[in-house]
Amino acid sequence: QVHLVESGGGSVQAGGSLKLSCAVSGYTVGTYSMGWFRQAPENERDGVALINNSDGTTAYAESVKGRFTISRDSDKNILYLQMNSLKPEDTAMYYCAARPGGKPLRWSTYAYNYWGQGTQVTVSS
């Protein structure tokens, strides 16, 4: 049983920053991947940033490169998403997700077995 709980969302003005956290529990020994996804009204849920939790390999959506950073604290079992230079188009519900396997990193939501409840990020202009 894998349990993911997001936190850290909120409202911020354009140009500001937020740091999201995802507390992870229930993993067994082995390689797995995690990611942050987001879904805005009228849009499909899509990937923002991915990470291999064993070797730290990361991947980013083009829209957030240079602004967002995904990382993890293995000792504390927490996944992070540091979001800088936020734009109104970043407004969405943000979800963390996990799946078995480390490579290749996968962008499809269908590849992920476990999901958190989501945390809302609202960026005003």
Image (spheres, helix red, strand yellow):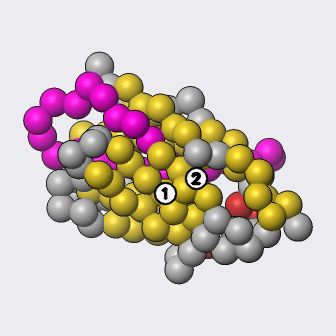
- Judged from this view, the residue extending furthest toward the right is 125
Q: Residue 41 appears at what percent x and percent y?
A: 80, 45
Q: Residue 79 appears at what percent x and percent y?
A: 38, 48
| Rendered image: mark on residue 46 | 2
| Rendered image: mark on residue 81 | 1
Q: Residue 58 appears at what percent x and percent y?
A: 34, 66
Q: Does dot 2 land on a helix, a strand or a loop?
A: strand
- Judged from this view, the residue extending furthest toward the bottom is 66
Q: From the viewer's perspective, tell me whether residue 5 is left or right of residue 103.
A: right
The CA distance from mark 2 to mark 1 is 15 Å
Q: From the viewer's perspective, tell me whether residue 120 is left or right of residue 74.
A: right
Q: Name the image quarter holding the N terminus.
A: top left
Q: Residue at x 58, y 64 (%)?
A: 83
Q: From the viewer's perspective, tell me whether residue 28 is left or right of residue 42.
A: left
Q: Nearer the viewer, residue 36 or 42?
A: 36
Q: Can residue 108 be seen in this view?
A: no
Give neighbour class at mark 1: few <14, some 14-19, many 20+ (Cα, 10 Å). many
Q: Residue at x 38, y 26 (%)?
A: 3
**Which residue range is magenta in the image?**
22-44
